[in-house]
Image: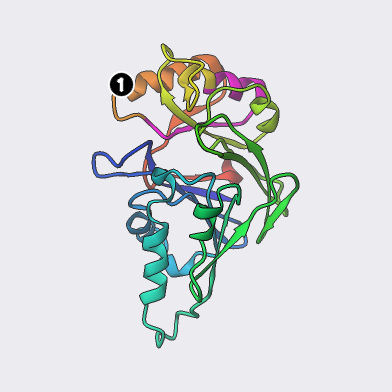
Amino acid sequence: MKLTALGVWGGYPYRDAGTTAYLLTSNSGFNLLIEAGSRAVTELEHELSPLCLDAVIVSHYHEDHIADLGVLRQYRQLWPKDDPDWDSAVLKIYGHDEDPEAFAKLTLEGVSQGIAYDVTGVQKIGPFDVTFQRTVHPVICYAMRITERKTGQTLVFTGDTGWFEGLGDFAQGADMFLADVYFFADKSQMPNHLSSVEAGRIARQAAVKRLLLTHLPQFGDLEQLRQEAESEAQDIPTELAVPHQQWDFNLL
């Protein structure tokens, strides 16, 4: 698998970069967009035509995670139908249905189809098996464990979450732990997002191969944030997510 960062900020776009959005590409070439925060479509264009997406999955319905879903649908709806390279495929968008109003908006006839993912079992999306863990957040949100069936390569994405027991078990042995970190070490046990040290502690408990910090704050020294997480993660490589940086799971 290959993971490409598109947007890495929490809350709002900042310094010419967008909010949470990641492209996960399987070894077979299946393209899954994880979250669709602000600027996701224009950032995606630097990596891949938005027409080439195979599916989208979202953890919850806060705007910094779904702001560009409408833009993405319009992009595909308005693209010339006589383009021989465009098959006008209906895009599958996976989300939870515990907010019926927000879930209903995922579907646009002839353009996109909202699919309620199975939060208690295994959701198959192309070559991926996805399982879910509800997180600690002001609205219903799910962490995701995404495994490529053929290789066993695994990405765990926390979505937005405060600390809770069980997240370490959920992330156990992951190749990549993509962690929501909006707070420095001086703010822990927050009800909505992890602190740097909490993310590092979970990574160490779960014995992941690599810790990647995302949903970054627009304030403070981000290198300090990384170092705080790394101090808890100990010997686990710890990085800040950077737009358009890529991680090849075959090389981790």
Q: Position of residue 163 (x, y in %)?
A: 56, 22
Q: Is residue 109 visible?
A: yes
In the rendered view, does 202 fall on the left or right side of 101? Answer: right
Which element is circle 1 on? loop
- Which quarter of the figure is the C terminus placed in? top right
In the rendered view, does 112 fall on the left or right side of 203? Answer: left
- Residues shaded magenta: 199-216
Q: Is residue 119 above or below residue 41?
A: above
Residue matched to label 1: 221
Please identify the quarter of the rendering in which residue 226 is found.
top left
User: How has the structure been colored for display?
Assistant: rainbow
In the rendered view, does 212 fall on the left or right side of 70? Answer: right
Q: Position of residue 46 (x, y in %)?
A: 35, 58
Callout 1 amino acid: Asp
Please identify the quarter of the rendering in which residue 166 is found.
top right
Residue for point 45% across, 30% down: 239
- Pick the residue in front: 173 or 64: 64
